[in-house]
Image (cartoon, rainbow, N blue to C red):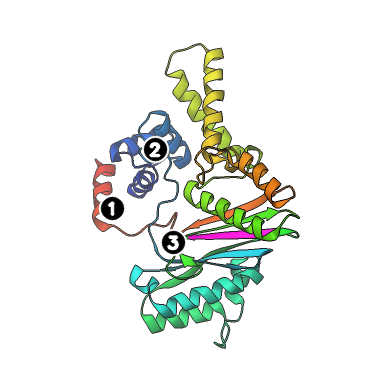
Amino acid sequence: MATITASMVKELREKTGAGMMDCKNALAENDGDMDAAVDWLRAKGLSKAAKKAGRIAAEGLIGLAGTDGRGALVEVNSETDFVARNAEFQAMVSAIADLAVEAGGDVEALAAMEMPGKGETVAEHIKTMIGTIGENMNLRRTAALEVDEGVVASYMHNAVAPGLGKIGVIVALASSGDAAKLAAFGKQIAMHIAATNPLAVSADDLDAEIVERERAVLMEQARESGKPENIIEKMVEGRLRKYFEEVVLLAQTFVIDGESKVADAIEAAAKDVGAPIEIKGFVRYALGEGLDKKDEDFAAEVAAAASG
């Protein structure tokens, strides 16, 4: 049987929001398998944060840049929000975002590119800024999208300056229709993605492992009803359809009007721009998602529970 450590309990609690002893029991029941323990807590109704997949626990800025046919996002982290409000830091992130359009989503290539007017690479310039400002920083990630015909629209939520903020979205729309109208509609789609955080464009694009995990959790929940297996199957399929409406872009309710499905809104927009529209892909970055801050008091609390 796997040894359940304090750090494992801490990680599971941060992922789910469940109680410490529930997390310890979940890990014990699943031989230390973190993903299985998350599903176990969800099936038992003990996960308080099942939908909070990305916990924001770092500072810095999301930057975006691009042209109609190309767009890119970057995340540059700092230790404090104070640095994120620093004009020199903001200028650095903007310049890195501009370079990211050429890097094509390769963070190592971006780090190795020459910083305009600085005589050093992006990675070297970040180190220089660390020495200047006195706070740790890092280029965490980048993503890029491109279409041959159409637009890559964007939206920045909680913007502190043009192209800089806390949540950034780029979305690629392929179409031969009116470019200005397509760009305006693309921004609405990007705003929708910022608000709803879908996992994929369509159900077919969802990771099969994610779907199967969700199905297994729903099956376990349905079995607790005590109903026959054939009824349970129908219950699960119905709940899966509801799940898809929550996490699949085309199946979501369009936040701009609060009524249409996104797929229907795209059809209506296609008539307006004069040509079919296809969503080729999207990227949504929320600042600090998946990163954790140190909390010594919390760690001691977990250690006590794990050893008890």
Q: Residue at x 53, y 14 (%)?
A: 231
Q: Earlier in the sequence, mark 2 or mark 1?
A: 2
Taking the image as shown, residue 109 lies to the left or right of residue 198, namely right
Tell me if label 2 and label 3 are in contact, CB under 8 Å.
no
Residue highlighted by disc 2: 27
For the magenta stretch, what is the residue range? 151-156
Q: Position of residue 65 (x, y in %)?
A: 58, 68
Taking the image as shown, residue 300 lies to the left or right of residue 131, namely left
- Asked whether residue 105 is in view, the answer is no
Against 112, residue 29 (above or below) is above
Mark 3 → mark 1, Cα distance in angstroms: 27 Å
* SS label for mark 3: loop
Residue highlighted by disc 3: 166
Q: Residue at x 29, y 39 (%)?
A: 19
Q: Nearer the viewer, residue 153 or 109?
A: 153
* Three-letter amino acid code at the position of disc 1: Ala
Please identify the quadrant where the C terminus is shown: top left
Q: Earlier in the sequence, mark 2 or mark 3?
A: 2
Q: Nearer the viewer, residue 36 or 5?
A: 36
* SS label for mark 2: helix
Q: Position of residue 46 (x, y in %)?
A: 35, 33
Q: Residue at x 44, y 61 (%)?
A: 166
Q: Residue at x 56, y 52 (%)?
A: 188
Quadrant for residue 198, please give it: top right
What crowding class fits label 3: few (fewer than 14 Cα within 10 Å), some (14-19), or many (20 or more)?
A: many
| 153 inside magenta stretch | yes
Q: Position of residue 115 (x, y in %)?
A: 57, 81
Residue highlighted by disc 1: 299
